[in-house]
Image (spheres, grey):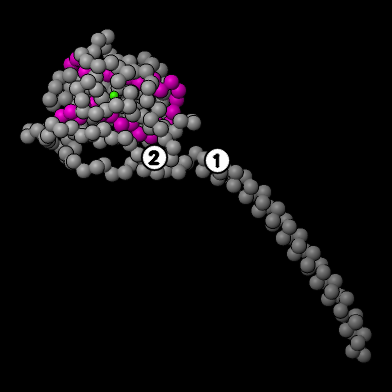
Amino acid sequence: MIFPLKSKASPIINKQNFMKHTQHTRKFLLTSALTATLLLPNLGLKRLLAADKPEFAPLKLQLPLPTAKGTPDDLPTGPNVEKFTDKPRAAFMAPKGVKNVALGKKVTCSLDKLYSGTLSQITDGKKDPDDDQAVEMKKGVQWVQIDLEKVYPVYAIVVWHDHRWLQVFKDVVVQAADDADFTKNVRTIFNNDLENESGRGIGTDKQYFETAEGKLIDAKGVQARYLRFYSKGSNMTAYNVYQEIEVYALPAS
Ligand SMILES: [Ca+2]
């Protein structure tokens, strides 16, 4: 009597199990397909985002020799002047593979004549505190301009005005534009011109001392081809002076 019941029940149970199994399999396959459909574009998107956000590493600079002229006694002070330090700058993080894209690029300026040097010396890679490496131009608000020849995302700009002496250059403004005449999409990257001497607006950045470290400006990936650098002498000289300007960007942009 028991066997027939069992034998009747078994196929039903097996069939139910089979149905359940089939339903589970279908659910699993559907879920898997759905997950794959949702994940694949995300993975693609993630890859794209990863490509947009490159890996960062400390920026390595080739620093010039320090000056042997010593420290003047009457160093400028005040709330708008960074405190002088002879310690190395903290590491600046920039995307891996950035290069000085300004090296060898054409430089123009606000004047027809220079006092000393040539404009090409501003992007020749040399920045030692030697008199024959200083490019000097007359007093007043003057500018030099670099054409990077194409648009780059710029991460760091390093400027050596004149570190032959420990001094502070005045009204330093750095701007980017889409055209050589600086009429299109002009953006200010750095400005310590507190009284709008250069007519570029009042700056909020601090004045700083010239040292072999140069002034590193965080350009935050600004898209730029033309860069213009304003100044109006220093606390030691009315001249405007440059030894080198470096512009760090990813070359394959
Ligand atoms: Ca130089």
Q: Secondary structure at mark 1?
A: helix
Residue type, mark 1 in image: Leu
Q: Residue furthest left?
A: 73
Whole-percent x, y for residue 81 in the image: 17, 35
Label 2 to label 1, Cα distance in Å? Answer: 19 Å
Closest to the camera, between mark 2 and mark 1, is 2
Rendered residue at 85%/71% (across/down): 15
**Residues drawn in magenta:** 136-165
The quarter of the picture where residue 215 lies is top left
Give the answer, above or below, for where 214 lies relative to 23: above
The correct choice, above or below, for 43 with respect to 104 in the image is below
232 drawn magenta: no
Q: Residue at x 44, y 33 (%)?
A: 250
The answer to which of 213 and 130 lies nearer the viewer is 130
Residue 167 can be seen, yes or no: no
Q: Which residue is labeled 1 in the image?
A: 48
Q: Residues within 10 Å of mark 1 (few under 14, many from 20)?
A: few
